[in-house]
Amino acid sequence: MNTFYIIGTGPGDPELITVKGLRTMEKCATLVAPKAKVNGDSTALGIVKGLLNLDDKKVVEVCFPMHKVNNGRSSREVEAAWQEAARLILDHLKEGDVAFPTLGDPAVYSTGFYVYATLKEMAPDMEIKIIPGITAMSCCSAMGNQPLCLGGEVLAVVPATFDDDRLRAILANCDSVVLMKVHTVLPRLLGLLDELGLTKRAVCYEQCGMAGEKVHSDLRQLVGRELHYFSTIIIRK
């Protein structure tokens, strides 16, 4: 039986795709790539195109609506997308190996593992392999010349969309905090950081690893402007 691969493509720079990830995609007959909008493009596929010629492969883009998923539960629309993708993957596996390129690393807030779980429900004995990728936070750390954690420090990686009480507890109890999905909640987040005296400890990385990447060491200058979806804040005490 052919194999399904979930492959991390890294944060944006095609040169940050791992050698193993690239070699695996080279041998796959089909690439099934996720995208957020029906009429949009797959960011992960765009990264792959910067390094791999896809002329001899089947390329299918599948839309996964950007809805919240809590404890594995989501809207019917999102679950329907997972099931559609799973059926499509199973169909293409009849013709050869299939790769699912996904941004960053599949283990960190990735659509890939929802597809994995759906496939395993439909075909428990199928072979699925995960190939890790470089995370956005690792890229941000390198870009800012700062570690994520050292020695006995505690690192937390969380969506900035958590409620204030939950974020406050995390920020108070961890030495380093990576906040993802900050683009829609910056004013509220800035108020919380001010309250905890952490504003000057926070650095925002916008589109790290992509064209137009920026580093913002003064979060106040970002108030009132539209941040890119791919923006991450690292706070080190």
Image (cartoon, rainbow, N blue to C red):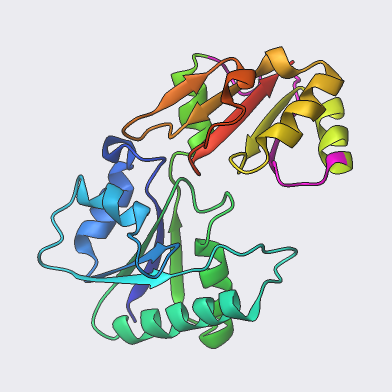
User: How many marks do you count on the picture?
Assistant: 0
Whole-percent x and y of residue 10?
A: 40, 42
Residue 174 appears in the picture as rendered: no
Stretch in magenta = 146-164
User: Residue extending furthest left?
Assistant: 55
In-image side of 184 versus 55 (left or right): right
Q: Nearer the viewer, residue 23 or 199?
A: 199
Q: Residue at x 74, y 15 (%)?
A: 237
Q: Name above or below for residue 89 compared with residue 36.
A: below
Q: Residue at x 43, y 24 (%)?
A: 214
Horizontal relation, residue 68 to residue 127: left or right:
right
Residue at 85 percent across and 42 percent down: it is 166
**Which quarter of the figure is the N terminus placed in?**
bottom left
Q: Is 73 situated left or right of 140 in this image?
A: right
Please provide percent x and percent y for residue 224: 59, 31
Above or below 89: residue 180? above
> Does the magenta run of residues contain 138?
no
In front of the other: 203 or 156: 203
